[in-house]
Each structure stands twice: as structure tokens, then as C-alpha cells.
Amino acid sequence: MKETNILAFDIGKKKIGIARCYSNFGIPSPLKTILNDEKVFSEIESIIIQESANLLVVGIPRNMNGEFTEQTNYTRDFITKLSDKFSLPIVEQDESLTTKKAEEEISTKKKFNFDDDSLAATYILEDYLAQSGV
């Protein structure tokens, strides 16, 4: 069975949280947060290469009623750009409340080696893995 190296993204207009998981371990972990600026796609390309990623999972935000928002549209546009630049499969994953959960968890701990954006990406990846059975 081919190993799946997954990167998950929590897309924001200023920052993007990234998490990773290798299918042979099955444990998602925060990787880093990058700026969403003019260098974002070259940074993502470097990370894809470094992590030997062959699947991208992107969190799709919705409001509390499950409806799409302005941020949903922004994220979908970002996914289109990702798809244009990289020939990797991209999966959309509901990210409901992942950022809030990450902020709450970090606020209860004294010290983390990562931030709420990469932790939110980890929760997105956990949800994807639980639903897909990878």
C-alpha cells in the first residue's frame, strides 16, 4: 500500500496554519504557520517537497448554521489557485469550530511550540482522517 503524506491547511487572509500526517503513523501534528502573502505558493511548494506530500486537505469554513460565508468563498478561490499550481489531489474538509477549539486549548496551556493556526489545521486533519478511514 502506498504511503500517503498529507498536509492540511487552515486558510486565513493573513496567515495559513499547516499540519501534517504520514499514513504509516496516522497521527496528525501541527507543522507551522506561514504568512498569506505574495510568497505563499512558493512557501507551500517548499513544504510539499520537504514533506513529500501527495494529498492536500483544506478546511472549509461555514457559519453556525452550516451556510457558506465570505471566508468560504475566499478559501475556495485559494483552493482553485492551489489546484492550478500543484498537481496533487485536494480534499475539502469542514472546519467548523476548529479555530475556536485551538484557541481555547492554547489558552489553557502554559507553553506550546506551535500556534492556534497550525493547531486548527491539525484538527481539520484529524476530522478528515476520522471520516476517510485513511
Image (spheres, helix red, strand yellow):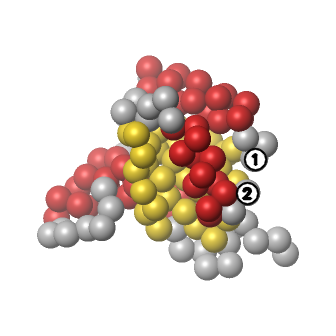
Total marks in image: 2
Q: Position of residue 117 (x, y in %)?
A: 36, 49
Q: Are marks 1 and 2 in contact (CB under 8 Å)?
A: yes
Which residue type carries mark 2? Asn
- Report the residue marked by disc 1: 88
Q: Position of residue 112 (x, y in %)?
A: 26, 67
In this view, the residue in front, 101 or 13, is: 13
The residue that appears at 55% across and 63% down in the rendered structure is 20
Indicate the secondary structure of the residue bearing disc 2. Answer: loop
Q: Position of residue 14 (x, y in %)?
A: 36, 33
* Residue 123 showing in the rendered view: no
Give left or right: position of 70 versus 87. left
Mark 1 vs 2, N-terminal side: 2
The residue that appears at 44% across and 26% down in the rendered structure is 71
> Which image quarter: residue 35?
top left
**In the displayed structure, would residue 63 be above or below residue 34?**
above
